Amino acid sequence: MITRRLLNQLQQLLQENASVVLLGPRQVGKTTLAFALQQTLPGVYLDLENRTDLLKVQDIEAFHQANRERLIILDEVQRLPDIFAPIRGLIDAERRRGHRHGLFLFLGSAALHLLKQSSESLAGRLALAELFPVDALEYQPPGAATDSLNLLWLRGGFPESLLAADDAVSLRWRQHFIRTYLERDVPALGPRVPATTLERLWMMLAHSQGGPLNASTLASGLDVSSVSVARYVDLLTDLLLLRRLPPFVGNVRKRLVKSPRVYVRDSGIAHALLNIGSFNELLGHPVAGKSWEGFVIESLLAVLPSRVQACYYRTAGGAEIDLVLDFPSEPGKRYAIEIKRSPAAGLSRGFHEACADITPSHRFVVHGQTDAFTLPGGIEVLGLREMMGRLGEV
């Protein structure tokens, strides 16, 4: 059992809000987290993909009345969007009775789809949390720190994949996961997308991990329109399987690259799409550098407070910073983060030029080892886990 950091945050949100939406892709551990929550907060769990459970909430008012003293947990709630309107009335009625907190917990795997449904009905009555795949701070088994980090990078953070008996079992699980999404979960959300087309797009994005989103090039390779590509990318983003990292927007007198960078969010899923089954295969693959970059970015974003804004910086002339973090609540605070596999890797001229352009308050090089030291100019070099710890304290 891997202890998830979000458990404490979820408990706090339920103490402060009538309802909470917990987002995360399928199989990431939302249900397990909800069951762990029930150890301290009595609740009743319903899976809306289960026919019997679905029947129980057809009259949500009666079900709530029978379970008024317990937290009602509704899994895959995007399957029943009409439920939010009557729940609003139930929450308001409980507020008038003085019961304001911890009434409903919604679990969902389609972010924009679910947020649109819930926010329209539960405005002011809802808090949001996102469960990322297991990250490097959560997964620290006994043994060499670097070995466990490499295993997490290879297999990704879905618990069934990460904790598999061996690499072959892990790869098969991820391949089945991909097939299930394409054949069952995507059609269930409504849009008619050919599974073969979506799989090819997903694979193309894995091959170009961390590259700029070029809908025209992707459309040409898939023999579909750019509009269709944009719609498919939106869908995979909505399912929390892709991340679009926005470009830096600021008052810089240089021509900036303005396309978002696209990453397959879980490194293990990216590797399965590329049929990479072992660490040696990964190190020899052309995508290894960008895969590591995406893995680090996703790890850092997992611990960031929601108010921090993340982007990348690149000019037409090649000045570049892998990750820029802005802290709106602290004017002038800006982190420039360069990502390397090894602490011995040199910094490019482009990084220094980019830092001169945007004048960050702090400069970091984040790598996959445990060494920590400072370079001339105050650039801190540190391992991924140490950087995650720093950001978690912000």
Image (cartoon, rainbow, N blue to C red):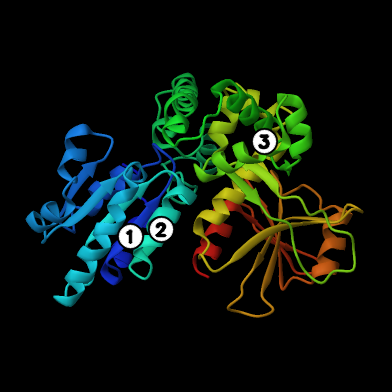
Read off the residue under disc 2: 129
Disc with the residue nearer the chain's start (2 vs 1) = 1
> Residue 146, which numbered label?
none
Asked if residue 270 lies left or right of residue 102, the reply is right
Does the residue at mark 2 contact the one at mark 1 (Cβ under 8 Å)? yes
Distance between mark 3 and mark 2 Cα atoms = 29 Å
Residue 265 in sight in this render:
no
Snapshot quadrant of residue 80: top left
Q: Secondary structure at mark 2?
A: strand
How many residues crowd around disc 1 within 10 Å: few (fewer than 14), some, or many (20 or more)?
many
Snapshot quadrant of residue 37: bottom left
Asked if residue 127 lies left or right of residue 39, the reply is right
| Residue type marked 1 | Val
The percent coordinates of residue 338 (x first, y second) are 73, 55
How many residues crowd around disc 3 within 10 Å: few (fewer than 14), some, or many (20 or more)?
many
Q: Residue furthest right?
A: 317
In depth, the one of 219 and 310 nearer the eye is: 219
Judged by depth in the image, the label closer to the viewer, 2 or 1, is 1
Q: Residue furthest bottom?
A: 331
Read off the residue under disc 1: 20
Snapshot quadrant of residue 360: bottom right
The residue lying at 68 percent from left, 58 percent from top is: 311
Asked if residue 83 lies left or right of residue 366, the reply is left
Distance between mark 2 and mark 1 Cα atoms = 7 Å
> Residue 229, which numbered label?
3
| Residue type marked 3 | Val
The percent coordinates of residue 327 (x first, y second) are 61, 72
Disc with the residue nearer the chain's start (3 vs 2) = 2
Does the residue at mark 3 contact the one at mark 2 (Cβ under 8 Å)? no
The percent coordinates of residue 79 (x first, y second) are 34, 41
The residue lying at 61 percent from left, 75 percent from top is: 328
Disc with the residue nearer the chain's start (3 vs 1) = 1
